[in-house]
C-alpha cells in the first residue's frame, strides 16, 4: 500500500467557498461536536467502492482509506474494461479499425472515428473536401452534445437530481435519431471513415439539424434552471474537488477538467483541424477548479457546440464528401462499370486496404472528455504497426486521488462525476 | 402479455347470463354439479377467481422484475435509454434498477466482460438470491462480439447461466424490451415446484 | 523510416513551423551531436536520445523557459522484435505556453532499465505502469510499478509482437471439426463435416 499523505489541517472539514450574495443559500445544520470528536482518529478504514457500483460511471474500482467519513487516500484500480484495442488495431486494416474505435469512448463514438481517420489521413497525406469537413464537424459536435447530456444526466442523478436524467435523454434521443438517419445506427455509427465519410448525408439531414439547433438552447436553459442556482446543488458542488491549474497540467488533464481550473486549452483552438478555425465559438474556462466550475464549463460547452453546428449547417458547401484519391476511398459504382482502373482500385481496397507510406504521426482531437490522441506508426503495410490511443479519461482519472483528498466519502461520487470519465477510454 | 384468457378464470359475466345461473342444457337433477362455465361466472361476480398457485407466483415474479445495475460498456447506455422516457421499460415492470444484487432478481449483463471482470461478474451473480435470471445483452456479452482477443471473455455463458441472449452492437432499446418480454414468457412457463419456494 | 536530419528547422517565412522544433534545438544544445537524432515527419518532430540522458533532457525540457513542455500527453512503446533494442519508448510532451508538441524517443531492450519520469510529471505514473503491463518494460524509480490494466496474476505482455492474441476459434460450417469440441459439434450438418474431412 502506498505511503499515506499527511492529514491536512486539523481534521475538520475543509472550508467551502461561500456562495454569492443574492442567491438563496440554506445554511446546513451545525455539525455536532460529538461527531467531530469521534471522526478524528488514528485508525484508517479501507473500503472498496466498485467495480459494480451505480455511481462510478462504469467498472471502476476505488480503494478508499477513510478516517471516519473523510478520504485520506484514494487508489483507483482500473482495467475492468480492458479490451485490447491497441492489439486489435494491429491485426485489422485501417478501415476495419474504424468500427473498433467506435467502442472506445462509447458516449460520443463519432469523435473516436474522427481522431483515427485524421491520424490515418495525415499518414496518407490526403485532404478531405470542404463538405466532408463540415459534415464531420457537425457530426462531431452533435455527439459532443450527446455525451455532455449523458454526463449531465448521470452527474445530477448521482448528486440526487433524478429529473435531469430523464430530461437529458429526451434531447439525446433526438440526436441519436439524426445519427440513425445518416448512418443507420444510433450509437456506433462508423460514419466518419478514413478518406471522408461513409456516404453523403440524405436531404432530410439539414432540416433535422436545423430543427434541433432551433430548440436546443431552450432545453439547456431548462437544465440550468434546474441546477445552476439550485442551493442544494451549489452546496454540494462549490468548493469540492478543487484542482489547481499547475497540478492539472502536470497530471496531463485536458478537456473540461483542465478548463475548469482556468487553463484555456482546447485542441480545436490550439491545433485546429477539419476547418474548426473557420467557426466562431468560445472556449469556456472556470475560475476555482471545483466541481461546480466544471459543471458550468460543460453546460456552456453544450451551448457553444450548438453554435458551431448552427454555423456549419448554414454554411454547408456542396461537392463531394470523400477525397478523390482512389487508392483510399472506394470509387462510385458507376465508375467501376466503365473504368478498368476503378475496378482494380475497388478490388485492392476491398481486399487488402490502402497502404500508407512508412512514418509516424501524433494526431489529437478534442473529444467530449479532453484531448483524444492517436500516435500512429505505419511500416508501409495495410495495418497500423502500432496505434496508441491517448484516452483523455486515463490522465484525468489519475488526478482523482489528488482531488478527493480530505473530502467526505459521499462527495467522492460528485467528484468522479465532474471529471466525466469513461472507462472505455481509461482501459481501452 | 401473451396469456390466453382461459388461463385466468377471472371472467366478466355478461348480464344475459345472469338469468342462466343454475340452468344448463341438462335437465335439472337435484344434487347435480353445475357446468364449469356457470360456476365460474357465479364466482367471478362475487370477486372469486381460481387459478393455480404456480401461475400466480409466476405472474408476480415476471410482472415486477428488478434488474441489478450491471452496465459495463456501450450496451449500458442503451439500457439506460431503455429505462428512460421514450422506450419505457417501466411499463413492463422492470422499473427499479437496484444497485445491490441482494435486492434484485435479474442481471442484465450489458457490455463486454474483460478477464479481470469475470470473477466479479460471478460474485455478483452468486450474491443474487433465487429466483434469478440473466439476460446477456449485446454481442460482446453473448459471444465476445467483435473482440476475439486475449482480453475479453468470449461470452458470459462461460461464467454465469444465461436465460435470454440479445444480439446487436448495441441492441436497440426495443431489443432489450423484447428480451424482457421473452423472459417474462419464460418465467410464466416455468413450473413452480412447491408453494414453499 | 525517413532518414534522420541532424538539425531542427526553425520557423521561416509563411510556412507554418514544424511542431517540436524548440525541443530539437534544446537537445542539440545539451547533447553532443552523435547522441541525439532528430526525425521530422508530417511536420512533427521526434527526438531520439540515449536512455542515460533521459532524466536530464526531460528535466530541461520541462524547466527551460524557451521549451517549457509542462504537460505530459502520453507515453508508449512500440515493439520492433528484429532489432537488438526492440522497444522504442516514446514520450509525447506538450507546451501550453508555446503551443508546441514533441515526441521524445528512447530505444531500449527488454533488460534496459528506463528511469521513471513520475517524479517530474505525476501524470506519467500511470502511463509507465501501462507500458510495464503491456510490454514488460523495466522502469526504475517508480513509486508503484504493478500491473494496471490486466489482472495481477497475468502472465505475458500482450502488446509485444510475439504474443499471440486469440480469443476463440470462430465456428463456420466448413471448420466445425477444428473449431468446436466434440460435445459442441452439432449432428445435423453431415455435409459440412464431410466436406471438412475431405479437405484435410
Image (cartoon, rainbow, N blue to C red):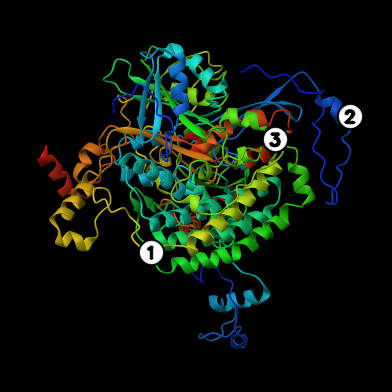
Residue under disc 2 on the same chain as residue under disc 3: yes
| Residue at 48%, 41% in the rendered image | A271
| Residue at 80%, 38% in the rendered image | A17
Q: Is residue A135 visible?
A: yes
Q: Residue B22, position in %: x, y?
A: 60, 83
In the picture of the structure, the residue carrying the numbered disc 1 is A318
- The front one of A387 and A168 is A387
In the picture of the structure, the residue carrying the numbered disc 3 is A241
Q: Residue furthest front?
A: C13
Give the Cα separation between the discs numbered 2 and 1. Answer: 71 Å
In which image quadrant can residue C133 be found?
top left
With B38 as the anchor, is C26 left or right in this view? Answer: left
In the picture of the structure, the residue carrying the numbered disc 2 is A34
Q: Earlier in the sequence, mark 2 or mark 1?
A: 2
| Residue at 65%, 16% in the rendered image | A3
Against B88, is A345 above or below? above
Give the Cα separation between the discs numbered 2 and 3. Answer: 26 Å
Against A221, is A396 above or below? above
Could you tell me which secondary element the residue under label 3 belongs to? loop
- The front one of C192 and A291 is A291
Q: Earlier in the sequence, mark 2 or mark 3?
A: 2
Q: Earlier in the sequence, mark 1 or mark 3?
A: 3
What is the crowding at mark 1: few (fewer than 14 residues within 10 Å), some, or many (at least 20)?
few
Amino acid at each position: 500500500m502506498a505511503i499515506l499523505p499527511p492529514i491536512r489541517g486539523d481534521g475538520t472539514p475543509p472550508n467551502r467557498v461561500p456562495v454569492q450574495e443574492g442567491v438563496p443559500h440554506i445554511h446546513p445544520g451545525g455539525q455536532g461536536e460529538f461527531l467531530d470528536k469521534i471522526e478524528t482518529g488514528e485508525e484508517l478504514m479501507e473500503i472498496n467502492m466498485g467495480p459494480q457500483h451505480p455511481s462510478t460511471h462504469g467498472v471502476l474500482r476505488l480503494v478508499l482509506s477513510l478516517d471516519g467519513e473523510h478520504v485520506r487516500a484514494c487508489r483507483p484500480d482500473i482495467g475492468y474494461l480492458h479490451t485490447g484495442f491497441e492489439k486489435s488495431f494491429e491485426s485489422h486494416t485501417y478501415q476495419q479499425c474504424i468500427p473498433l474505435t467506435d467502442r472506445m469512448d462509447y458516449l460520443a463514438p463519432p469523435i473516436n472515428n474522427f481522431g483515427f481517420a485524421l491520424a490515418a489521413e495525415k499518414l496518407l497525406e490526403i485532404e478531405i473536401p470542404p463538405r466532408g469537413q463540415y459534415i464531420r464537424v457537425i457530426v462531431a459536435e452533435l455527439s459532443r452534445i450527446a455525451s455532455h447530456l449523458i454526463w449531465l444526466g448521470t452527474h445530477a442523478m448521482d448528486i440526487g437530481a433524478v429529473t435531469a436524467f430523464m430530461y437529458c435523454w429526451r434531447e439525446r434521443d433526438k440526436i441519436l435519431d439524426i445519427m440513425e438517419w445518416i448512418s443507420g445506427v444510433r450509437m456506433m455509427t462508423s460514419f466518419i471513415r478514413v478518406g471522408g465519410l461513409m456516404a453523403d448525408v440524405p436531404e432530410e439531414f439539414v432540416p433535422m439539424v436545423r430543427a434541433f439547433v432551433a430548440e436546443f438552447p431552450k432545453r439547456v436553459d431548462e437544465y440550468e434552471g434546474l441546477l445552476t442556482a439550485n442551493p442544494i446543488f451549489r452546496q454540494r458542488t462549490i468548493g469540492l474537488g478543487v484542482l489547481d491549474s499547475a497540478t492539472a497540467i502536470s497530471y496531463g488533464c485536458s478537456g473540461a477538467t483542465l478548463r475548469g481550473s482556468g487553463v484555456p486549452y482546447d485542441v480545436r483552438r490550439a491545433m485546429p483541424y477539419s476547418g474548426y478555425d473557420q467557426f466562431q465559438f468560445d472556449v469556456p474556462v472556470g475560475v476555482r477548479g471545483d466541481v461546480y466550475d466544471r459543471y458550468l464549463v460543460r453546460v456552456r460547452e453544450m451551448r457553444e457546440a450548438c453554435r458551431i453546428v448552427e454555423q456549419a449547417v448554414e454554411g454547408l458547401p456542396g461537392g463531394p464528401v470523400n477525397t478523390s484519391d482512389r487508392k483510399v476511398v472506394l470509387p462510385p459504382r458507376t465508375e467501376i462499370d466503365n473504368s478498368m482502373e476503378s475496378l482494380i482500385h475497388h478490388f485492392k481496397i476491398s481486399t487488402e486496404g490502402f497502404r500508407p507510406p512508412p512514418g509516424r504521426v501524433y494526431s489529437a482531437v478534442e473529444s467530449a472528455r479532453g484531448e483524444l490522441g492517436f500516435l500512429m506508426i505505419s511500416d508501409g503495410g495495410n495495418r497500423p504497426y502500432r496505434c496508441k490511443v491517448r484516452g483523455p479519461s486515463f490522465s484525468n482519472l489519475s488526478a482523482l486521488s489528488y482531488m478527493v483528498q480530505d473530502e467526505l466519502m459521499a462527495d467522492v461520487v460528485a467528484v468522479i462525476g465532474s471529471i466525466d470519465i469513461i472507462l472505455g477510454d481509461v482501459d481501452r | 402479455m401473451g396469456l390466453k384468457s382461459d388461463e385466468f378464470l377471472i371472467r366478466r359475466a355478461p348480464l344475459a347470463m345472469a338469468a342462466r345461473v343454475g340452468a344448463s342444457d341438462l335437465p335439472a337433477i337435484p344434487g347435480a354439479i353445475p357446468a364449469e362455465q356457470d360456476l365460474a361466472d357465479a364466482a367471478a361476480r362475487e370477486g372469486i377467481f381460481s387459478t393455480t398457485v404456480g401461475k400466480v407466483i409466476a405472474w408476480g415474479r415476471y410482472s415486477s422484475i428488478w434488474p441489478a445495475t450491471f452496465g459495463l460498456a456501450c450496451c449500458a447506455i442503451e439500457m439506460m435509454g431503455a429505462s428512460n422516457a421514450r422506450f419505457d421499460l417501466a411499463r413492463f415492470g422492470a422499473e427499479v434498477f437496484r444497485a445491490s444484487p441482494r435486492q434484485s432478481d435479474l442481471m442484465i449483463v450489458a457490455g463486454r466482460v474483460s478477464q479481470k471482470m469475470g470473477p466479479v461478474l460471478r460474485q455478483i451473480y452468486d450474491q443474487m438470491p433465487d429466483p434469478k435470471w440473466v439476460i446477456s445483452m449485446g454481442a460482446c456479452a453473448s459471444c465476445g462480439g467483435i473482440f476475439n482477443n486475449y482480453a475479453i471473455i468470449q461470452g458470459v455463458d462461460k461464467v454465469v447461466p444465461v436465460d435470454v441472449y440479445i444480439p446487436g452492437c448495441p441492441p436497440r432499446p426495443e431489443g432489450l424490451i423484447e428480451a424482457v418480454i421473452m423472459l417474462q414468457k419464460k418465467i410464466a412457463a416455468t413450473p413452480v415446484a412447491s408453494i414453499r419456494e | 523510416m525517413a532518414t534522420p536530419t541532424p538539425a531542427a528547422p526553425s520557423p521561416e517565412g509563411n510556412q507554418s513551423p514544424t511542431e517540436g522544433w524548440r525541443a530539437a534545438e534544446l537537445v542539440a544544445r545539451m547533447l553532443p551531436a552523435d547522441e541525439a537524432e532528430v526525425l521530422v515527419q508530417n511536420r512533427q518532430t521526434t527526438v531520439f536520445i540515449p536512455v542515460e540522458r533521459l532524466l536530464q533532457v526531460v528535466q530541461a525540457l520541462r524547466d527551460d523557459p524557451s521549451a517549457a513542455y509542462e504537460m505530459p500527453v502520453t507515453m508508449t512503446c512500440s515493439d520492433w522484435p528484429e532489432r537488438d533494442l526492440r522497444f522504442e519508448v516514446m514520450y509525447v510532451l506538450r507546451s501550453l505556453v508555446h503551443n508546441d508538441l514533441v515526441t521524445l524517443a528512447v530505444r531500449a531492450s527488454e533488460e534496459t532499465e528506463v528511469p521513471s519520469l513520475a517524479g517530474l510529471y505525476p501524470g506519467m505514473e500511470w502511463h509507465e505502469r501501462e507500458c510495464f503491463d503491456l510490454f514488460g518494460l523495466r522502469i526504475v524509480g517508480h513509486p508503484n510499478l504493478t500491473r494496471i490494466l490486466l489482472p495481477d496474476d497475468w502472465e505475458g505482455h500482450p502488446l509485444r509482437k510475439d504474443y499471440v492474441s486469440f480469443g476463440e476459434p470462430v465456428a463456420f460450417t466448413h471448420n466445425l471439426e477444428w473449431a468446436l469440441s466434440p460435445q459442441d459439434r452439432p449432428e445435423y450438418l453431415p455435409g459440412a463435416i464431410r466436406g471438412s474431412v475431405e479437405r484435410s
